Image (tube, rainbow, N blue to C red):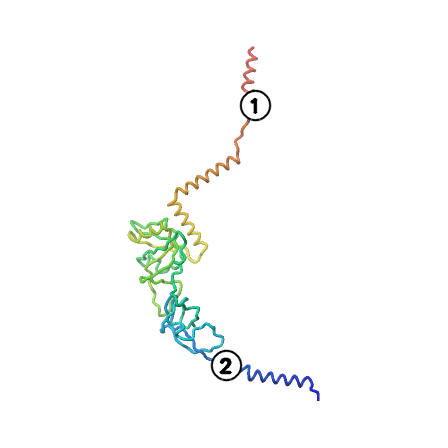
Amino acid sequence: MKLNNRFIFGIVSIALAAVVAFVAIPAVSRQTNGKTEIVRVVQPVRKGAVLTTKDIEIVEVGGYNLPPNIARNENDVVGKYVTADLDAGDYILSSKVSFAPVSSDIQLSSIPSGKVAISLTVKSLASGLSDKLQTGDIVRVYHYLDGANEIPELRFVQVLSVTDSKGVNVDYSRELSEDEEKRQSATVTVLAAPEQAKIITALENDGVAHVALICRDNEKLANELLETQDAILREIYDPADEEADDEEDEAEADESAVTENPADTTSVPDGDDPEDDENESDSGGEE
């Protein structure tokens, strides 16, 4: 007896349906409904802090589509340093914790050659821009000593960090959580040339410094202002170089003028002086 194609197709369809119903679906269901324990943060933890048992909890969640490097027990994270800010409810990945201490002062690790980092004291709320300074700001420093005066050497200065009275960095760029208390800035660390550092040191002993915000979140303008400040420092502390450059520019300008407008010169052959001809004519007339 020959089997027609429809009968064969029906048998195959039934077999495939049985495989899907009794094999594939249960396997997917086990993966999606399967539970596993992971570590979750219960309160904000800032970069560089050490994780403790008070910062985390173990919760049971669905195991489907979880990252392979997620922390699953306390031993994976407790006692390690956090490499990024964590908020309540965040899962912890192995890439966000480290055995080695993490420096929160990244800016201090990349100080350009010829520059220094130096701090100036914020002696009042007003002198520190009402606790609104942020890393990367360009500020102008004034001082009050026998009157308020602007300091040319500190016209454009970059802020590296702001710290509280305990030396802990203060980040005013983010919103505070409900249970987090606002901290007042006590010092401002800036990037400075050695000449600027000497002036800041003098201000710490002889006057009150005030900072005024000039630029924020504008990298192009910030670079231009810092270049302008470097030019001011060169003009003040290297006047000889500036005068040499001015003299060189003047010499080049004079040379260019001579080349473009050469002096008119007319050569007269020997023996053809017009005055001699005139004298000869007069002599002939008298004779």
Between 205 and 117, the one lying in front of the other is: 117
Residue reaching furthest to the right: 1
Name the amino acid, label 1. Pro
Q: Name the secondary structure under disc 1.
A: loop
Query: Left or right of 17: which side holds 195?
Result: left
Q: Position of residue 272 (x, y in %)?
A: 57, 21
Q: Is residue 199 above or below residue 170?
A: above
Measured Cα–Cα span from mark 1 to mark 2? 116 Å
Q: Which of the image's four quarters has the N terminus?
A: bottom right
Name the amino acid, label 2. Arg
Query: Left or right of 80: which side holds 284?
Result: right
Q: Which of labels 1 and 2 is toward the front?
A: 2
Residue reaching furthest to the top: 287
- Between discs 1 and 2, the one toward the N terminus: 2
Residue reaching furthest to the bottom: 1
Q: Is residue 116 above or below residue 10?
A: above
Within 10 angstroms of label 2, few (less than 14), some, or many (20 or more) residues?
A: few
Residue visible at 47% across and 73% down in the picture: 68
Q: Which mark is residue 269?
A: 1
Between 54 and 143, the one lying in front of the other is: 54
Q: Position of residue 41 (x, y in %)?
A: 40, 72
**Count of all numbered marks drawn on residues in the image:** 2
Q: Is residue 107 above or below residue 248?
A: below
Residue for badge 2: 30
Within 10 angstroms of label 1, few (less than 14), some, or many (20 or more) residues?
A: few
